[in-house]
Amino acid sequence: MRENKVLTKLILLIPLLFFCNNSGVAASVDTVNCRSVEQVVKIPELPDSLSFAGEEVPLEYWDVRESLQREITTISYWHGSLSYIIQLDNRYRDEITRVLKEEGVPEDFYYLCVAESGIQPVVSPANAAGYWQFLRTTAREYGLVVDEEVDERYNIEKSTRAAAAYFRKGREEFGSWTLSAASYNIGMDNVRYRVKIQNENNYYDMQFPEETGRYLFRALAFKTIMNDPERYGFYIDKSRLFNELKYTEVEVNGAVENWSDFARQHGTNFKILKIYNQWIRANMLFNKAKRKYTVKLPAEGNR
């Protein structure tokens, strides 16, 4: 009996859903007949034009439009996650884009960082880590310290400079920033092989595994939405954005017996010290190699 009632409700709802989906979202939201629907889902509009690192996205191609549509639609409905990323964007964008610019890499690569990690110090199932999701071996290849005490994949400035070195190398080899970006996901050897067997050197004309095929479009979707969030329904008051972390710096070139004690001596605690220095991976630093590390300390009034 209960199943019959549910079925009857579903049958009655079908024409209502059809009406809502075909009467235009702006109208359907305000239409009395649609008010009983729990959610109205809209496929977002695509931009009229788009570029990545100065290279135009060929939106005249249906397959390119569909790929971009998929990512913009998916990301625009990550309500909680994208809201948090937009808050973090206010904290980290200037620092990351400044380093990219200093390293001669277009600022659009910032959106690869967003796509890789959500601008967060995370670890992937494949053990890629940090803001730019470096694997351990690649990180070391590009000059980052990775051990039990220190992991510079979590140092925003140093990991961004390492990523920029990779992007420049890819640009030099493949002749485009888009293929350089693709190689960051799948590796330069794999891109090199695909360029050879497909006789193509344009990302948008090439066949890649699904993850890489979606990779650049995901970054483009973040760029599109984050540069005009209200168009996609994200009305986040400026007062809710996260402030930049204000800090002073001290140099450490020896051992630190206990980072908690170190933090306390500098007027803070280990929790806050870690927020400012995610690269610290243990509660002590033996520092047998006698490397010099720059430690950020919260500025006065910033805890």
Image: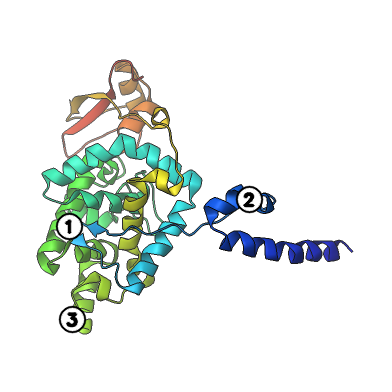
Query: Which residue occupies the foreground of this view, 145 or 3?
Result: 3
Q: Residue at x 39, y 44 (%)?
A: 229
Determine whether label 3 and label 1 are within 8 Å by CB. no
Q: Amino acid at mark 2?
A: Thr
Q: Amino acid at mark 1?
A: Gly
Q: CA distance from mark 2 to mark 3?
A: 56 Å
Q: CA distance from mark 1 to mark 2?
A: 43 Å
In this rendering, is residue 83 above or below 31? above
- Mark 1 or mark 2, which has the lower sequence index? 2
Q: Is residue 296 left or right of residue 69?
A: left
Q: Which residue is mark 2?
A: 31
Of badges 3 and 1, the one in the foreground is: 1
Q: Which residue is mark 1?
A: 54
| Quadrant in the picture for residue 71 | bottom left
Residue 59 placed where, x, y %? 30, 67
Q: Which residue is mark 3?
A: 196
In this rendering, is residue 173 above or below 238? below
Of badges 1 and 2, the one in the foreground is: 2
Q: Residue at x 12, y 47 (%)?
A: 103
Q: Is residue 227 left or right of residue 78?
A: left
